[in-house]
Each structure stands twice: as structure tokens, then as C-alpha cells.
Image (cartoon, rainbow, N blue to C red):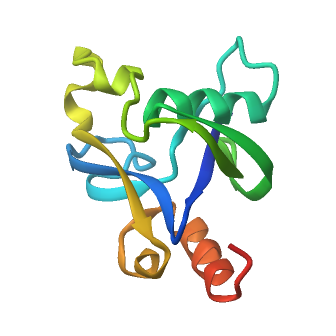
Amino acid sequence: MKTRCAGIVLFDEGIALMHRKNVKKTDNPLRPYGEYYVFPGGGLEESDTSLEEAVKREILEEFGITVNVIKKQYENIIENELAEYIFLCEYVSGEFGKGNGPEFSNDPAYADRGEYLPEIVDKNRIKDIRLLPEILKEKLVNDIENGVI
């Protein structure tokens, strides 16, 4: 089973998300396509000593910022396929949008994966965007509406 670690990074009245555009369709039903947003993150690597370390590494790679992990906010398990952990994080330092992860390297392995655009989305707009996975979007919208986030 694959493990994915991601973060919710708060910026004033917004949340940092990765905007994905022009993602090509594949045969993998777990791979979305088209245009959508995702929580910044990625797969757990062998060198990661914890889920928290993985999310900090991924956010640095994707957004160019350092964060502190506050707590695990959500968990999404897709039977025998994927375990996804979303952590609430706070910004520490760095210039947002200056990530240098492999998705920004023109690596041919990413050719069909479309564009990766770091964005800070106003909390009030979250309910109106295509944020995946949908189950976690619903939890986030609920937490925003209830003042938890």
C-alpha cells in the first residue's frame, strides 16, 4: 500500500494548495485528470523517519517554504491502495512558490502530469473548487464553516 503525506498550510485567510492543470487521462482510476487542486504532498520515501518529516520535505519541495507540523488533521484510507495523511501546518519561513521538486524539473516522467501551480486559495472559495480527494474536501469545508480551520 502506498503512503501519501500532505499538508494544510494556512496563510492569513487562505490555504496553500497545488493547482493542477492539463493533466492527461490515464488508465489508473486513482489518477485524476483535467484541472483540479490537491493538498501539497507526496509519497513517503525510504529516507523519511516519520510522516511529519515527509510532509515537511514535500512542502519544501513543492512550495519552497519551511513549515511546522501542528497535528494530523485527516486520514483517508483506500483499501489496499493508498493511505493518505493530511497534517495541519504553520508557515515558518521561505518564499512561497519557489519549490524545486521533481514536478518542476522538466523530467519526462512528468510530461503527462500537466502543470503544477502553487496557489493560496481563499478559505471561502474552497467549497467552489475541485479539490481532491473529494472526501477530504468535504471535511475541510466543514472545518472551515465550523471555525476549526
Give the residue drawn at x 58%, y 69%: 135
On screen, residue 40 above or below 35 = above
Give the image location of residue 108, x and y in percent: 22, 16
Q: Quadrant of residue 42?
A: top right
Quarter that holds the C terminus: bottom right
Identify which residue, 2 or 94, lies in the foreground: 94
Q: Quadrant of residue 122?
A: bottom left
How many circles with numbers are drawn on the protein? 0
Can residue 78 be seen here?
no
Residue, far top: 47
Give the residue drawn at x 54%, y 30%: 60
Give the residue drawn at x 43%, y 41%: 96
Q: Quadrant of residue 97?
A: top left
Give the image location of residue 44, x and y in percent: 66, 27
Quarter that holds the N terminus: top right
In the shown orientation, is residue 22 left or right of residue 55? left
Give the image location of residue 16, x and y in percent: 48, 54
Give the image location of residue 23, x and y in percent: 23, 45
Identify which residue, 56 or 48, lies in the foreground: 56
In the shown orientation, is residue 120 left or right of residue 70? left
On screen, residue 26 above or below 74 = above
Residue, far bottom: 146
Can residue 82 be seen here?
yes
Give the residue drawn at x 20%, y 26%: 111
